[in-house]
Image (spheres, rainbow, N blue to C red):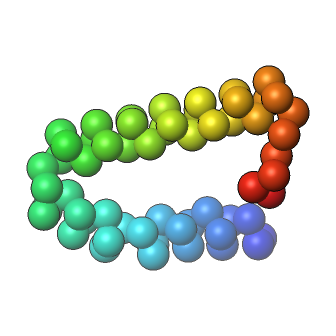
């Protein structure tokens, strides 16, 4: 029950800020920014996996 609340609560709370962000910029720019942030997160995860250092956690 708690995980469902967190899942759907996240959609509910992030829908309006995301819509405002898309309205300010274009959908295409926001999509590419999201891909870029995902890529950065991937590289950060891989760096921690290879070095076995997780000082930020």
Instruction: Please state which of residues 53 and 34 is positioned toward the viewer in this rendering.
Output: 53
Q: Residue drawn at (63%, 37%), measured in percent from left and top? A: 44
- Residue 31 % position (x, y): 28, 41
- Judge whether 54 appears above or below 43 on screen: below
Is 9 or 40 nearer to us in this picture?
Answer: 40
Quarter of image, res 21: bottom left
Q: In this rendering, would 31 be left or right of 43?
A: left
Q: Quadrant of the C terminus?
A: bottom right
Does 33 appear above or below 18? above
The image quadrant that residue 43 belongs to is: top right
**Residue 26 % position (x, y):** 12, 50
Q: Which of 27 and 5 is in front in this view?
A: 27
- Where in the figure is residue 49, as x and y percent of width and height? 80, 29
Vertical order, 34 against 2 (above or below): above
Query: Quarter of the image holding residue 23?
Result: bottom left
User: Residue 37: x and y, percent?
Assistant: 44, 42
Identify the residue at the far right of this view: 52
Foreground pick, 1 / 26: 26
State how many labels appear.
Answer: 0
Location of residue 43 with respect to 14 vertically, above or below: above
Left or right: 14 as drawn, with respect to 3: left
Q: Residue at x 31, y 73 (%)?
A: 16
Left or right side of 33 for 29: left
Residue drawn at point x = 36 percent, y = 67 percent: 15
Q: Quadrant of the N terminus?
A: bottom right
Please, which residue is most extreme toward the top here? 50
């Amino acid at each position: 029950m708690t995980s469902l609340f967190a899942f759907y609560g996240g959609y509910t709370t992030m829908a309006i800020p995301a819509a405002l962000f898309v309205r300010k910029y274009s959908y295409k720019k926001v999509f590419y920014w999201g891909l870029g942030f995902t890529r950065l997160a991937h590289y950060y995860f891989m760096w921690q996996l290879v070095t076995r250092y997780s000082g930020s956690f």
